[in-house]
Amino acid sequence: MNRYWNCQLAGWLAYSAVGITINLLNGRETLGPLLAGHAVLIAAGIVLTHQLRRAIHRRRVPGQSLGALWPFLTAQAVAISLLLTALVIAVNRLFAPGSWSLVAAAGLWWGMLLAVGVWVVLYVRFADQRSNQHREAQLQLALREAQLRALESQLNPHFLFNSLNSIRALVDLDPARAQDMLTRLSNVLRHRLRHDDAHTVPLQTELATVTDYLALETVRFADRLRSAVTVDPAAAACPIPPLLLQTLVENAIKHGIGQTRGPGDLVIQAHVEDAVLHVAVENTGTLRPAPADSTRVGLQNLRERLHLLYEGRAQLQLHEHGDRVRATVALPVLG
Amino acid sequence: MKAILVDDEPLARYELRRLLRAHPEVEIAGEAEDGEQALRLLAGTSPDLLFLDIQMPGLNGFDLLERLDGAIPQVIFTTAYEEHALRAFEVNALDYLLKPIAPERLAAALSRLDTRRPSAPLSQLFVRDGDRCWIVPLSGIYLLESEGNYTRLYFGKERPLLRRSLNALERRLAPQAFFRANRRQLLNLQWIDQTQLTPNGNLAVTLKAGPRVELSRRQSELLRAKLSP
């Protein structure tokens, strides 16, 4: 903010200084009227370009370069430079009445247009740079938050301790299965604890962890959880935001299977169609209002990350049909 | 001591059964995998002790206790993580065991149980108001007040609102202990401190905990009859 005002002031002062110097060297004007004219010019220049800045921010599309507004910016630059020209001529005529030749006025306007044009180009560059930095920071923040949530939701509550409890029962009932479950639990925890700033992972990488996770939940829920996975080979190689599938599957277990009496299904599907990756997680259950203890952070955070990563070209939807809830994600296949 | 195990995970029930083998005084009268099953089982077996998981499909552990209308046995919660939810208990805190359950913790919880207590139905009430829960002995409740379809309960310093009508509660409460003072209020006879005559000839009762309750004409007659030898 302060940098903006400093630049505004410094830019217009420098522009005026050049103008004053040229005029004085040519010996065309006396100092008094010249300074008065330029004071008005600086003030009007700052006010008008500041108005332009506000107009730009009203029109800007999040995630898009301001360069996309170029027809608007050009028209504004022309209008502002014309206004400034008229203003300077008017001030001049207060001191030295007389008409201006068209050539002189055009020369003055040309100078103004140059000034406002430079202003617009510089402003667009800086603003874009800033919004890119901002976007990157937001993306990092959302990812960290997702990692933290995931860490919390996996390391702490239900899943971990109930799994450990099931495994303790299996040690007695079926030692070989207990060993297998401990390996899978280790895999899930390791995936969770991995500190990785990558914005995407291949779907198959995430699917491997999700498979281990489902095996553990199957031990807990026994015949209440029937799961099926259908993933096309083309889809398996596609990059997805980390923990996307995991979040959807966890939601399906927590709000669907966990709340359903008797057997329930969980189906994971993924395929690529027209350069769009479609991932769907369907489960037995209903879309009920979130219980008091749920903050719905999982899905909300996922939506936010998709928005930041794909800038509106990714979709996440929840549908209910019959006794099923289906979460679908559509991602553009990049590259 | 007859006990019932309620948990939606078969292996969790298996673990509890295994741990209870070390406590032959606890006889497992049945198992349920959700709240509805547990309700049926409780009606059929009237156990002394309930091992209760909190998170279950359909009726969860708290919902189940609410449905029991006061006829609740002694309860030990078994939970993987909801300690925070259990901390909400303010009065007569129940015991809870964290899964996987440590054998010593189970032994300690069992030793704390009131083994002398006969399995008397209707001796305590599970009360939930928002995030707070209580298990209140009926003898501690001195006044129940109707608020629309809900009922405000008075015990200790607490005034939770119960999502049940006063009429429904009155039917459940032992008639020898509670008395309907008027359309809006039900009072505990054991808590009566003084009775006075009001200018219009009705009775007014001051409870030991402080509140004064005015009786309707009809109920004044009834109380007089009840109190006179």
Image (cartoon, rainbow, N blue to C red):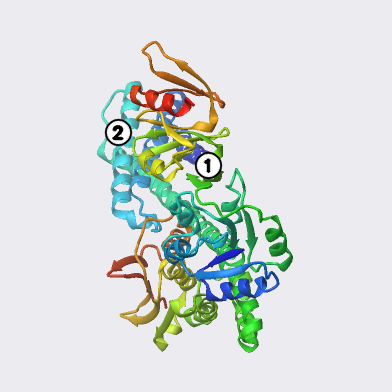
Which percent across, then down, holds residue A263?
40, 76
Residue B4 visible from this viewpoint: yes
Residue A196 visible from this viewpoint: no
Relative depth, front residue between B111 and A321: B111
Amino acid beneath label 2: Ala
Relative depth, front residue between A314 and A105: A314
Tag nearer the camera, 2 or 1 = 1
Q: Chain of mark 2?
A: A
Mark 2 on the same chain as mark 1: no
The number of numbered badges drawn on the structure is: 2
Locate residue A126 relative to residue B76 in the image: left or right: left
Task: Sort mark 2 into few (<14), some (14-19) or many (20+) by Cα contacts within 10 Å.
Answer: some
Which percent across, then down, holds residue A237?
46, 84
Residue found at the far front of this picture:
B229
Rendering quarter of residue B197: top left
Task: Sort mark 1 into few (<14), some (14-19) or many (20+) by Cα contacts within 10 Å.
Answer: some
Report the residue at 68% width, 60% height from top: B110
Relative depth, front residue between A46 and A328: A328
Locate residue A100 relative to residue A241 in the image: left or right: left
Locate residue B74 relative to residue B197 in the image: left or right: right
**Which dot marks residue B138?**
1
Which percent across, then down, holds residue A320?
30, 66
Relative depth, front residue between B210 and A90: B210
Q: Chain of mark 1?
A: B
Which residue is labeled 2 in the image?
A86
> Is B199 located above or below residue B181 in the figure?
above
